[in-house]
Image (cartoon, rainbow, N blue to C red):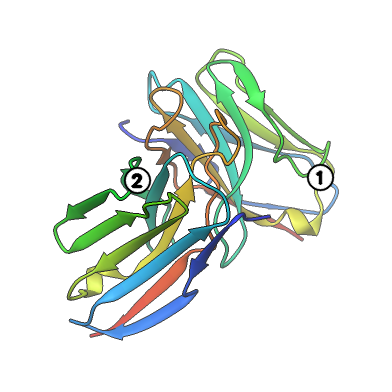
């Protein structure tokens, strides 16, 4: 595929459950980003990978959020013990190199916590 | 929280009217990107501005970067229904060398056909 692929598109979970969101970036893209977008708001940065290295995780809201990209391609965002305030769209983006590059976004995963 | 202010938050126009959204920062920006997000869609890259006073055009869209690199604007001439969506400015990392984009709140454009 030519674009960034995210799965699942929709996820409903009960409060307290763990969830895992997957991002498949554009092949060969070095940089990968996760954003959280609440309804009516702009995307908010969560974390950034350059290849397999997580260089910035300053946006992760709590230690319940964890992201990895072990082989420098596919990335997983995991949320443990989900809370209702975690309900949002989680967007993944990739860019070819580091710095001053257009970011290519996936369609996102809409997470609803009941 | 967000460190750029984008105004207006909402804009409703008649088809054919012009539209402008403004992005303001209290600090000097190294560069700024603009994205468009259609309802139910994901952000799509439009343009990147790097130089002070830079002006770039894409058909009916005109993008400007202020002389002091603290503000930017997007102007659409003669809007069409396909322009509907939310327009975000996104300076790259307000910390020198940071890779992340800091998105504004966005301006949601709706158009009366």
| Residue A61 versus residue A69 in the image, above or below | below
Front residue (pair A64, A40): A40
Residue B83's x, y, as percent? Answer: 27, 68
Q: How many marks?
A: 2
Tell me the chain of label 2: B
Residue B49's x, y, as percent? Answer: 33, 44
Q: Quadrant of the N terminus of chain B?
A: bottom right
Horizontally, residue B62 falls left or right of residue A37, namely: left
The crowd level at tag 2 (other Cα within 10 Å; few <14, some 14-19, many 20+) is: some
Q: Name, please, the residue furthest toward the top.
A: A71
Say which residue appears at 58% left-offset and 56% top-offset.
Answer: B26
Which dot marks residue B33?
none
Q: Name, please, the residue furthest toward the front.
A: B68
Say which residue appears at 80% left-offset and 48% top-offset.
Answer: A82
Front residue (pair A69, B57): B57
| Residue B88 versus residue A102 in the image, above or below | below
* Mark 2 secondary-structure assignment: loop
Horizontally, residue B79 falls left or right of residue B99, namely: left
| Residue A96 versus residue B44 in the image, above or below | above
Front residue (pair A73, A45): A45
**Distance between the alpha carbons at the discs numbered 2 and 1:** 49 Å
Say which residue appears at 50% left-offset and 19% top-offset.
Answer: A73
Which dot marks residue B52?
2
* Mark 1 secondary-structure assignment: loop
Q: Is residue B39 visible?
A: no
Which residue is label 1 attached to? A17
Q: Is residue B19 visible?
A: yes
Q: In which quarter of the image is the C terminus of chain B?
A: bottom left
Say which residue appears at 23% left-offset and 60% top-offset.
Answer: B62
Residue B18's x, y, as percent? Answer: 24, 77
């Amino acid at each position: 595929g030519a674009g960034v692929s995210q799965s699942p598109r929709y996820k409903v979970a009960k409060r307290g459950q763990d969830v895992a969101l997957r991002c498949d970036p554009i092949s060969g893209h070095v940089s990968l980003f996760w954003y959280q977008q609440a309804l009516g708001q702009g995307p908010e940065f969560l974390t950034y990978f350059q290849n397999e290295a997580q260089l910035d995780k300053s946006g992760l809201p709590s230690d319940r959020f964890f992201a990895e990209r072990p082989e420098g391609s596919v990335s997983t965002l995991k949320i443990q013990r989900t809370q209702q305030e975690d309900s949002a769209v989680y967007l993944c983006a990739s860019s070819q190199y580091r710095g001053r590059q257009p970011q290519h976004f996936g369609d996102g995963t809409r997470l609803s916590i009941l | 929280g967000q460190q750029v202010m984008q105004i207006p938050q909402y804009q409703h126009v008649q088809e054919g009217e012009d539209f402008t959204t403004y992005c303001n920062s209290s600090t000097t920006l190294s560069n700024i990107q603009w994205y468009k997000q259609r309802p139910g869609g994901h952000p799509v890259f439009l343009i990147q501005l790097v130089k002070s006073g830079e002006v770039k055009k894409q058909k009916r869209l005109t993008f400007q970067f202020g002389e002091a690199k603290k503000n930017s604007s997007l102007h659409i001439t003669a809007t069409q229904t396909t322009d509907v969506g939310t327009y975000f400015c996104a300076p790259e990392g307000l910390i020198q060398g940071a890779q992340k984009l800091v998105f504004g709140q966005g301006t949601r454009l709706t158009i009366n056909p």
